[in-house]
Amino acid sequence: MLYRKMNKTDRKLSILGFGCMRLPPTADFEIDELKATAMVRYAIDRGVNYIDTAYVYHNGQSEPFLGRALADGYREKVSLATKLPVWDVRSRKDMDRILDEQLKRLNTDHIDFYLLHGLSRSSWNDMAALNVGEFLDGAIADGRIRYAGFSFHDNVQAFREIVDAYPWTFAQIQYNYMDEENQAGTSGLNYAAGKGLGIIIMEPLRGGVLAQETAETKKLWASGGQTRMAAEWGLRWLWNRPEITVVLSGMSTMQQVKDNLGYANGGKPSSLTSGELAVYEQVKTFYNSRIKIPCTNCGYCQPCMVGVKIPVCFSAYNDAFIYQDTGRAKSAYDAFAGSDGAASQCQDCGVCESLCPQKILIRERLKEVVSLFRH
């Protein structure tokens, strides 16, 4: 296993982190503890020392599961990360109450890396108004957490604002070779790294779609002169960036654990050749050729007078065609647009169309989103 030191800490962390959001389920959708425990311990025994979970993963069962899986001396071998569910916080007292509950669920006396979960500009403003900085400072001072960070889903401008708003140790962002300009993107990654923050990557394979292979992508990957699966290509692209500390993978099978451990052996920074990097651009071009709506996520159409999250709607719609996976795209649409921001809320006023630099017929395209996702 290869390791990288995170800035502002004394920790050398494995470049592969174990994300505990997609653990193997039983027939009744509980965590299959025998399989999941074996996977987690197998990874730790082979050098993985960063384990990531959250209060809500697996309907609240991921943290208690890890409390059991990390018994028998495994807790002492890893840096443990979990997240404050900011949407459940109504007061300053809620923060301490939830953290104390998490410590009990995880059967530990401290969290090594504690994140505010899924921040946007709006949720950060809510947390700041409740003095979350005071809470984080206090939890660090009393030893309940070691380092404070945040995970993020919004645009790069909001990301920069949040980075500058508190002395964070690290940030966790969605990033992969198809998401260089989405959410925080490359610009945000460079900004945070330039401020000395450690960078943790989530969704390195976009929920698994970048691990899928088509006849076209197989041919393109093969042109790079290396025998690699699509998943390895995706992970290696991230490990090639020296600014990135840990790449999380939400592994669901023992075979995925074994595969990713093997891929990590080659994950040295700046190790990809110019020819290999050119192949990523070819694959991106292929995927982008499937885009149906030419939205650039510039945001000029926002805010919509009735709250439709137009760029989110179009991004999910495009993803359904780019990756040929409507089910996964709908899940993202439901999560990030929600009922209030769904395309079906459009009132057909047309204001957005007068503001769109791409001259997209937004009202008509939103109807297509409704037709595909049924709301």
Image (cartoon, rainbow, N blue to C red):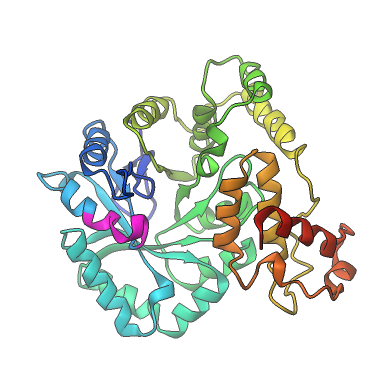
Magenta stretch, main secondary structure, is helix
Is residue 243 positioned above or below 120 on the image?
A: above
Q: Which region is colored magenta?
A: 56-64
Q: Give the quadrant of residue 99.
A: bottom left
Query: In the drawing, does residue 79 fall left or right of residue 85?
Result: left
Residue 293 percent across, percent down from the top left? 79, 50
- 148 drawn magenta: no
Asked whether 29 or 44 is in front, the reply is: 29
* Residue at the farthest left position: 72
- 58 drawn magenta: yes
Write the residue at 52% across / 79% down.
125
Name the quarter where the N terminus is drawn: top left
Residue 264 percent across, percent down from the top left? 40, 30
Asked whether 126 or 374 is in front, the reply is: 374
Let me know if residue 9 appears in the view.
yes
Write the residue at 77% across / 61% down.
366
Query: In the drawing, does residue 142 fall left or right of residue 285?
Result: left
Report the label total.
Answer: 0
Is residue 35 positioned above or below 131 on the image?
A: above
Residue 181 percent across, percent down from the top left? 67, 50
Write the residue at 45% across / 71% down.
166
Write the residue at 22% across / 71% down.
100
Name the quarter where the C terminus is drawn: bottom right
Residue 171 percent across, percent down from the top left? 46, 57
Let me know if residue 4 appears in the view.
no
Is residue 166 positioned above or below 154 on the image?
A: below
